[in-house]
Each structure stands twice: as structure tokens, then as C-alpha cells.
Image: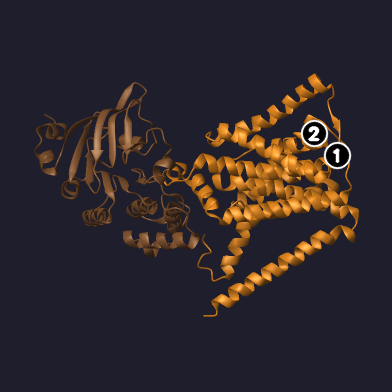
Amino acid sequence: MNKLPSISNNFQVRGIVLLIGLIILFTLPFYTPIYTSIFLSAIFMYIVLTSSWAMFSGPTGQISLATAAFFGVGIYIAATLGNKMPLPVLVLIGGLGSAGLALLVGSLTLRLKGVYFTIFTFGLLELMKFLLLWFEITFTGTRGRFVVVVDYKTVYFIMLVILVLTLLTSYLIRRSKYGLALQGIGEQEEAAEHIGINVTLLKVATFGISAFFMGATGAVMATRWTYVDPYIAFNMNYSFTPVLMAIFGGLGQFFGPILGAIIFAYLEEILITQFPYYYMLLFGIVMVVSVLYLPNGLAGLVQKWRSREAGGEHAHS
Amino acid sequence: MPILEGQGVTKYFGGLAAVSDIDFHVDQGEIVGLIGPNGAGKTTLFGLISAAHVPKPGVIKFKGENITGLKPHQICRQGLARTFQSVKIFPNMPVISNVALGVHFGNSGQVTSSQAAEKAAKLLEFVGLLEMAATPAKDLTLVNQKLVEVARALATNPEVLLLDEIMAGLNSTEIALAMELVSKIRSQGITIFMIEHVMKAIMSVCDRIMVLHHGKKIAEGTPQEIATSKKVIEVYLGE
């Protein structure tokens, strides 16, 4: 009988914690050193890239390596139009540009399965890079562009807004019938089609939505660099890192990719500053260990502990 | 007027005609059986009806309208559902979510998630799996997984249901239950087109039977007629 009040209590507690957290995050730049805001902006970027990657690739199991392509489109849009428009408009255009590209290539290639899809998305990244390089050299006569620099607080706040929107979208999709349908597509695509799910549309739409956030993030983060060229903008690290972060954190749960991105980004920062020469090596070791011993990522580990505490009968799962 | 109808339905895989110039019809409220030796083209025909494959040439009509060339999800949303010979459940989802997905995306219109869960629970009760609602579908026995497929297909609110060998691998008690289930589905006003190898079952439950052999229709008639047809006996037992 007491179940209902305790559930709503729990809900309230969570809501309050969330609200306090948001207030802290939104006021942070006013009383912390500049470094904190810049570092947090980078973490926000990784969370957005990882969560939006997991939005599509998590449930469907189709591993996309196009993250850097969509991110790069955002960067280039900011670099090209930077002195003509205010940053929020730029971010919107960056997002829409990436989403447009995702819808286009998605509708052409999402019937590709497994490794073929993965290789195609990686090819898209290379294609975008060299297409732009060719375009810049042939038509504009430049190789790179200077980016209008924006102060760190603006970057921080816009990144935070994108972060909140990404997580909200990801959460809502996950909880909706479309989230369940995406999971169905990942588990048994043929059956999903035959019970009335418009598989192509749902996949393309989700791919587009995830690319929107990647592009928007690119448009903001571009302002941190003073100069970009196609090699900087379409850096393949931005394709691989979100995948690693998501796997490290755990793909099965909403919090997995977030947790993965935070810890990973933090780890990267520490390793790079403390052990600049061994950074990649240590990074690799952490990765191998986590894949070997944490098949469901950190989130899976957390869930295991929780269910053990809850009585142990689900400890095996 | 037949609810489901095919004219000159043909499908080649490479140079081989898996289904060749078949005319068929299923009337409203009927239970029609589809039998034939292995490789006769039965499952391919079901695939053609449910749009997993496109007939070339040939026309398939549902409720008098040409549905050839539509996508599988469109076929389903028009009220034509199927199960699979090789079970195709969503293995890591709870049984009830398997079925609820059918309610959400099938022919039932917009429903809230609680309505979907309610209908899914009703259907699980109907096929006798309500106690396993929360179990991941992969942990069920093969028989029960087939029942999940039936419930999921029913969840899409079909007018015609294609059942592809739901009785294969069942023991005689389970076959009796499955036969009862088929009759129960029909009594809800759903027309059934079923592939089956279990002769006893198909003879007693069907109104009419079609026989395929090497992709061609070689006989059609009441169970009585089929059981005594010389041609059919030849195909099954050799000359």
C-alpha cells in the first residue's frame, strides 16, 4: 500500500537532485577558474558525442564511425559562416547541416548490415575530408580557415544547453515505443518489419537526430580552435573515441555512455598531463582491461552491485 | 470475394523457380492449409504474401486491393500478419515487450503504453504464456517461443494470419493445444492461412487445403479430397 508514495518520493528526490545539479552547472563559470569551464566544456562535448552516437548505434547494434564526419560538418559550418552570424544560429545550422547529411547517406546506406555499414561510415568521414580539401584548394584557394573566437563562458553555456537537450532527447527516445522498436530492429530486424515497424524510416530518422547533436557540438567547439583545416575538422579520433567511451561506460543503459565519457575524458586529461609519453599505452591498457572484465561496461557493473544489494536473486543477470 | 488472392504469383531465385505461376485465394473466415514436401515453395509463398519478397511476375490482392510492391510494415498495418518458420523473436526483450511492440506498430492505431501492455497481457493469457510475461524471450522453450510469435502477430490486430509451421517439433499434447488455439483464433473472426507438416492437425483443422510441389500448385480441395487424391499421394509417397 505504501508503494505509491515512496515511488513519487523517489521521483521528487531525483528531480531535486537534478535541479540542484543543473543550477550548479549553470553557475559554475562565475566562481571557478577558467580552466574548469574549459575542461568541463570538453567533457560535455564528449558526453554529447557519445550519447548521441549511442542513441542510434546502441539499440540497433549498427556501429557507426561517422561521428567525426558529422562533428566536422558542424566545425566547417562554423568556420565558414562564423563572422556572419551569431553563435546560436551557427550551432543550429551546424546541427541541421549534419542532420541533413545523415538523412541523405542514411537513406542510401542503412540497408547495409554489420561491418559493411561500419566501413561505409568510416569511408564517409574520409570522403568528406578529401572532398573539402579538394573544394578549398580548387575554388577558394585556401587550405584552412581562421575561426572567429568566442569567449569561454559562451562556449560553456551553449555546450551545456546542447548537453541537456541531447540527454533529454536520448532519454525520451529510450522510454518511448520508438526506443523499444529500435531495440527490436537491433535484435531481429526482419521480424520488426513484419510487425509493422517502418524500419528504414525509424533508422534514418534516429541517425539524423543523433547527427544533429554531433553537428551542433562541432559548431560550438570549432570556436575553441583559432584555425581549422579539413584534417583537423575531420579527425578520425572523434569517430573512435565515442565508441570506446560508450563501450567503456556500458551501452545497455542510459547512464552508461555518460559515465564512460566523463571518466574517459577525465582519464585522458590526467594521463596526458601526468604521463605524456605513456599516455596512449596506459589508455590502451585501460581499454583492454575494461573490455575483458567489464563486458557490460561500468553501468553493467553498477547494476550488478545494485541487484546484489537488492537481495541477490538477480545477481546472475 | 476472397479476402486474400494471388494471380500468377511467381518468384525466381537465380534460375530456379521457387514459386511458379500460382493462383490462390483465401476467403473471409476460412482456415486454409498449405502443404507440400520440403522445398516445395510454401515458405516462399508466405514471404511473397507478406512482402519479404516481391513476386515477378504476379499480383497479390488483399481485401480486393493490389498490395504487390508494398513494404512489409505496410502489409502488416493493413491487417495481414505472419509468424516465422524459424523463430524470429526479440530474444533479449521480455516476452510482454515482444508482444507490446506488435500492438504499438501494427494495425491497432495509436495506443498508450499502458493500453499496449494491457492488450499484450491479454494476448499472452490467450496463448497461455501470461506467467512468463517478464521472462526474456530467449529463455523460453521453442514451443513457447512459437507461441510468443503467434501472440505478437495477433497483437498487430490482423484480419488474416499466416502461420508458418507452428506445430513443427511439438509433441502430441502440444499439437492438440495448438489446434485448439488455431480454432480459437478463427472464432475471433481472423482468417487463417497455415503451412503445416503435421497431417493429422491440418486435416482436422482446415476447411480447404492447397498442395505445392516444386513451386507449382498440384492440388486443392477439402481435406477429404486431398487425402484421397492420387497425385498428392504420389508426391508424398512416391509412385
Q: Is residue B134 visible?
A: no
Q: Which residue is at a point 25% across and 53% down the rendered structure image?
A: B186
| Image disc number at residue A192 | none
Q: Is residue B228 visible?
A: yes
Q: Nearer the viewer, residue A299 or A112?
A: A112
Q: Quadrant of residue A215?
A: top right
Q: Residue furthest top?
A: A138
Residue identifier under label 1: A225
Q: Which tint is chain B? A: brown
The answer to whether marks 1 and 2 mark residues whose Cβ atoms lie closer than 8 Å is: yes
Asked if badge 1 and badge 2 are on a common chain, one would say: yes
Instruction: Give the x, y percent position of residue B137.
Output: 42, 55
Is residue A199 left or right of A260 when viewed as pictured? left
Vertically, is B235 above or below B197? above
Q: Chain of mark 2?
A: A
| Mark before the other along the chain sequence, 1 or 2 | 1
Label 2: which residue?
Answer: A232
Looking at the picture, how far across and down is residue B42, in whole percent? 28, 36
Which structural element holds mark 2? helix
**Residue A58, x across and y down, in percent:** 59, 47
Q: How much space separates mark 1 and mark 2, taking CA atoms?
A: 10 Å
Give the letter of the chain under mark 1. A
Residue at screen point 64% across, 44% down: A209
Identity, as a three-letter code, of the amino acid under mark 2: Ile
Q: Colour of chain A?
A: orange
Q: Residue at x 80, y 63 (%)?
A: A24
